[in-house]
Amino acid sequence: MNTLAPPHCVGCGHWLVDATDWPGTCDVCSAAWPDLRGSAGSLLFRERCAAPFGATGFRLRSERYLRAQIHDMKYGGNRFLAARWGKWLGDSHPCPAFLTAKETALIPVPMHWKKRMRRGYNQAFWIAWGVSMAWNLPVRPDLLRRTHHESSLTRLSRSDRSNRSQALYVSKRQSEVKAAVVVDDVLTTGSTMLACGVALERKGIRWDGAMTLALA
Ligand SMILES: [Zn+2]
């Protein structure tokens, strides 16, 4: 469900007569849009994971159709939808000048290979791929890897979870990439993002920022 391409509203499915933008939403759905693009989202984002630069699309609250979109790209195998939202996220934010260097890459938050095999894809990769279409930066999923397969860290306390997840990601050594922006679908506590940043910096790749489609 909810994979309707424009000219249908992604919220209610109504036909849109003059839809040129993605995501296409009708006036009623647009009015309820929990927009976090620009400085408001950036502030909340930096607060949670201390990323030097942060950009996000919308707040994931009770809007059923936005949840459905995330669910569909996470579990529904909808790579195209993830890439399309990624491009929307990139188009919504100008690429910061400090990211235009040739050695900068977009790195999706990695998924353990067992999980990726079961699911068939990593939605964060496809979101990053969409951002790369707007920002013209390479996507390098090979630079970060998840070392442990843990289904859930949610039962641990916040600080335990933070310490624990810092051991979950290692980056490959020796790369021409000097700086990176990490991309994911949803930012919750920010500990995963921070763990990725720490892992990159440990290997000499400057962590320049983070982007997610939504903020939980
Ligand atoms: Zn609508």
Image (cartoon, rainbow, N blue to C red):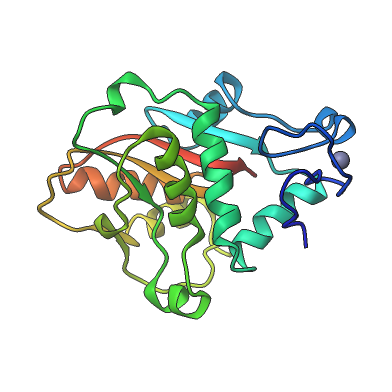
Residue 208 picture location, percent across and down: 31, 32
Q: Position of residue 181 (x, y in %)?
A: 35, 39
- Vertical placement of 48 versus 142: above or below? above
Q: Quadrant of ligand 1?
A: top right
| Residue under the point 47% across and 38% down | 211
Residue that extends furthest to the front in the rendered view of this protein: 17
Residue 188 visible from this viewpoint: no
Report the side of 120 relative to 208 (left or right): right
Q: Position of residue 137 (x, y in %)?
A: 32, 38
Front residue (pair 145, 121): 121
Res 117 → quadrant: bottom left
Picture residue at 57% right of the left edge, 37% below the top: 88
- Quick check: 106 above or below 74? above
Q: Residue at x 47, y 55 (%)?
A: 126
Q: Nearer the viewer, residue 165 or 120?
A: 120
**Residue at (61% x, 41% y) in the render:** 215
Determine which quarter of the picture holds residue 20: top right
Q: Is residue 96 above or below residue 181?
A: above
Looking at the image, the residue that sits furthest to the left is 174
Q: Position of residue 6 (x, y in %)?
A: 73, 45
- Can the viewer see residue 66? yes
Position of the N terminus, as image quadrant, is bottom right
Q: Along the line of sight, which residue is nearer the eye, 169 or 142?
A: 142
